[in-house]
Image: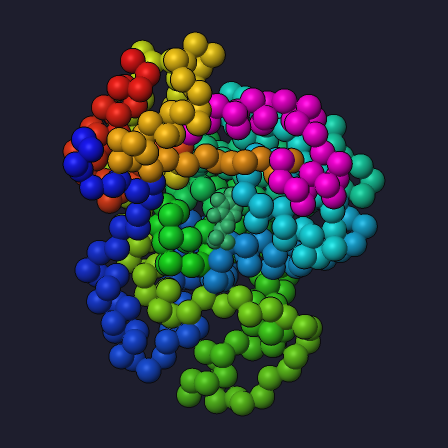
Amino acid sequence: MGQSPFLPFALPDIGDDEIAEVVDTLKSGWITTGPKAKRFEQAFAEFLGDPQIECIAVNSATAGLHLALEAIGLGPGDEVITTTHTFTATAEVVRYLGADVKLVDIDPATLNIDVKAIEAAITPRTKAIMPVHYAGLAVDMIAVLDIARRHGLRVIDDAAHALPTTLEKELIGTLGTDATVFSFYANKTMTTGEGGMLVTRNPEIAKRARIMRLHGMSRDAFDRFTAKVPSWYYEIVAPGFKYNLTDIAAALGLHQLKRLPAFQARREQIAASFNGAFADLPLILPPVAPEGDTHAWHLYVVRLADDAPITRDAFIEGMFAAGIGCSVHYVPLHLHPYWRDRYGLTPEQFPQSQKAFERTVSLPLYTAMSDADVERVIAAVRALLA
Ligand SMILES: *Cc1c(COP(=O)(O)O)cnc(C)c1O
């Protein structure tokens, strides 16, 4: 095993069609936001299968979350409730707008935000809830949307892990949130290198996000510079951002999206292999989606059980010694100096997230893994724990 090349924690899966499309873009004379970004938005809307949904391509999910919160008018004095068990991007965008973050604990069964804790965290300042579909397993959005309706709150879900994820057979992104944001970062279930998609059925949010995506201009660059709409005129209506997705990135996205069903099938297959091979080990295996629903399997997260022979850190070192990269998702936000100090947070306030953090390991699970790679991960885990 020591002689095998290092198996990284994640790798993108870029095929010849993606490469040819990027080359075509480079030769086309239009490399920034243009026809391919528009086609990618249309293809994404078709994938979601809802003609009322507007898709707004952006250069990261972080940008998309920022635009969504800006579009609902979030500002100083407002609070947004989210999970402590997430990447900092989910929460930082709230601070970009001068609003504050109310972190809550997770449900240990799913590692998703504890829906009961959401209701308890609501104050007169609460404006929105930002659930995260951790690892690719849907949050109980029916309950979240019900809380939001009863308290007059907005819901923007961070779906960076959730492509494709379903809840009661409906795709995340089509459940009637104010906005849902997907990520196409290099290690996500499909990638454009860097990129994201804001999706919404709310025409006002869509309009505002399109304007703020590109400097607060009333029309975007494609419309201005093509012959069809020969207008050189634009107006700046707000101090917007520079969050547009390039056609080079969209070229990747067009083909990655076509391959998404095959990617999903392969991820399911690897997750099933792991679940079978680890069933007898001192591990808490990842929760699975309810019968008939889809788990995106962006991450395969195990927790070391109380009777595991080694600690989490020793396990990761052992995997590394076997030439296999692992990761931890996440160091919860309440442990990071910025969030801890701003809100005076302690681990005792988040017992479930804290406990999960101390035991979790993310194993490599990606479509570029061969069957031999999968077997190698299984053998290394068994050697450490069996
Ligand atoms: C990756 C990720 C993001 C950020 O996505 P970018 O496209 O890199 O901005 C946000 N939230 C979560 C939970 C993520 O995993």
Q: Within the image, what quadrant is residue 339 found in?
A: top right
Horizontal side of 123 relative to 72 (left or right) equals: right
Looking at the image, how many numbered discs can be counted on the residues? Answer: 0
Camera sees residue 158 = yes
Report the quarter where the C terminus lies: top left
Range shown magenta: 335-361
Tell me which residue sits at (26%, 19%) in the image: 383
Question: Residue sitting at 21 percent across and 61 percent down?
Answer: 17
Residue 19 vertical position relative to residue 232 in the rendered view, above or below: above
For this view, does 259 lie left or right of residue 357?
left
| Percent of width and height locating residue 347 | 66, 27
Where is residue 357 drawn, in percent x and y?
53, 28
Residue 310 on the magenta span? no
| 45 vs 82, nearest the viewer | 82
User: In this picture, is 315 found above or below 166?
Assistant: above
Quarter where residue 385 is shown: top left
